[in-house]
């Protein structure tokens, strides 16, 4: 505060800046350092940078870009802080928007984003995961995607032509059920389509429109077959103790697969992804001590979690290089990594009714 008040004019100090006070109020009082950026000069600079670009765009795209700039115009400030918390380091951040500068549609999108991700979506992610991202796909996603398509010249007609060729409908067969809590998970692998690939991944979606998803996926499966000239077909298979519809190479290796595990739709790339997706609930990440320690220092109600399983990432990198994890840690660049047991990121869902949004990065550190 002494630094903020150092100006001779007490009426023109950072401490008197309303935006600074709002941002500071959303950060931990015990932090050992703060960073603040006023929103007004940021929004002014960005608007000036895109003004020329907008003049050269077709009217539909220019109008869409102008709508997207509303959020930047409404930005009042952002800030961050660093704190020592328990067994780790916390990096907190806040952002503040003037909600009166947003149109009703944008406000509705922000309101939809206030829905927290349910804890259930993490229950199927296994401890072998290298990284994961959870979040909620809001019901407004369908309209957002269709608006973006319709804003492009000739895109609507091109989409209609493609739908007729493949006997599929984007809205009915995909967008109508593309909503709900979701997680994208990266897991170790050894190969994909015969090529050495150390990492693959899968998506899990807990959609409230399960029946529509099943019907839509059948149509999409048939459309992929048509696009492949009839030689691309899905077949039943098993992996990780679960049943899947899979697309395989001529050599019998799984390229892509999907299926329902309980209420969760899972779509994985390669055999390793489907095996991990199917068996993850037997040893879930939520029971891992490092993950639990990080989760305890993130917002309980959040719009999604990013997690990086550092020991597992190091082990996978080591295996890909024909080394052990200890060899990686003993390298000059690896010694600083060994104490880091995991990194988690989460934010409170959306922004609150005053336009304030909060998020935290937590780095777990241990000598064990």
Image: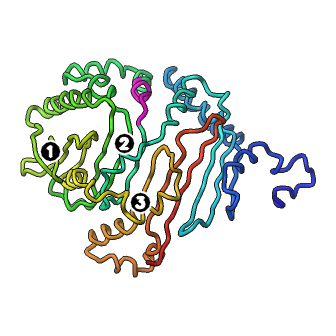
Predominant SS of the magenta segment: helix
Q: Whole-percent x and y of residue 330? A: 40, 81
Distance (Cα) linking label 3 and label 1: 28 Å
Label 3: element kind: strand
Nearest the viewer among 283 and 43 is 283
Q: Whole-percent x and y of residue 77? A: 68, 44
> Is 238 displayed left or right of 34 in the figure?
left
The residue stretch that appears in magenta: 137-146
The disc placed on residue 308 is 3
Image quarter where the C terminus lies is: bottom left
Question: From the viewer's perspective, is residue 355 above or below residue 54?
Answer: below
State the residue at coordinates (22%, 19%). Answer: 164
Distance (Cα) linking label 1 and label 2: 20 Å
Residue topped by disc 2: 182
Report if residue 48 is visible in the image.
no
Bin the neighbour count of mark 3 within 10 Å (Cα to Cα): few under 14, some 14-19, many 20 and up: many
Q: Earlier in the sequence, mark 3 or mark 1?
A: 1
Image quarter where the N terminus lies is: bottom right
Bin the neighbour count of mark 2 within 10 Å (Cα to Cα): few under 14, some 14-19, many 20 and up: many
Q: Are marks 3 and 1 in contact (CB under 8 Å)?
A: no
Residue topped by disc 1: 243
Nearest the viewer among 149 and 235 is 235
State the residue at coordinates (42%, 39%). Answer: 136
């Amino acid at each position: 505060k002494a630094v903020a008040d150092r100006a001779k004019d007490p009426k023109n100090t950072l401490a008197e800046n309303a935006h600074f006070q709002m941002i500071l109020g959303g950060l931990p009082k015990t932090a050992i350092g703060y960073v603040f950026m006023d929103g007004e000069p940021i929004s002014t600079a960005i608007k000036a940078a895109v003004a020329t670009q907008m003049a050269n765009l077709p009217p539909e795209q220019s109008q869409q870009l102008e709508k997207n700039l509303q959020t930047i115009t409404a930005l009042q400030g952002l800030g961050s802080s660093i704190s020592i918390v328990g067994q780790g380091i916390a990096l907190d951040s806040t952002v503040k928007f003037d909600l009166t500068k947003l149109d009703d549609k944008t406000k509705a999108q922000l309101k939809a984003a206030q829905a927290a991700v349910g804890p259930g979506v993490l229950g199927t992610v296994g401890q072998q995961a290298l990284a994961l991202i959870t979040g909620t796909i809001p019901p407004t996603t369908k309209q957002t995607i269709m608006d973006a398509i319709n804003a492009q010249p000739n895109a609507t007609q091109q989409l209609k032509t493609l739908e007729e060729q493949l006997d599929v409908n984007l809205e009915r067969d995909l967008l109508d059920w593309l909503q709900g809590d979701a997680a994208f998970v990266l897991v170790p692998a050894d190969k994909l389509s015969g090529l050495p690939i150390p990492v693959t991944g899968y998506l899990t979606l807990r959609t409230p429109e399960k029946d529509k998803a099943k019907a839509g996926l059948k149509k999409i499966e048939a459309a992929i077959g048509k696009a492949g000239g009839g030689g691309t077909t899905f077949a039943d298979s098993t992996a990780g103790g679960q049943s899947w519809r899979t697309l395989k190479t001529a050599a019998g290796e799984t390229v892509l697969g999907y299926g329902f595990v309980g209420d969760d739709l899972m779509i994985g790339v390669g055999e390793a992804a489907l095996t991990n997706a199917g068996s993850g609930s037997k040893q879930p990440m939520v029971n891992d001590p490092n993950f639990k320690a990080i989760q305890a220092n993130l917002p309980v109600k959040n719009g999604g979690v990013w997690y990086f399983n550092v020991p597992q990432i190091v082990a996978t990198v080591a295996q890909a290089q024909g080394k052990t994890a200890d060899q990686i840690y003993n390298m000059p660049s690896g010694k600083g990594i060994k104490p880091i047991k995991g990194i988690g990121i989460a934010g409170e869902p959306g922004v609150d009714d005053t336009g304030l949004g909060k998020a935290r990065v937590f780095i777990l550190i241990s000598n064990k």
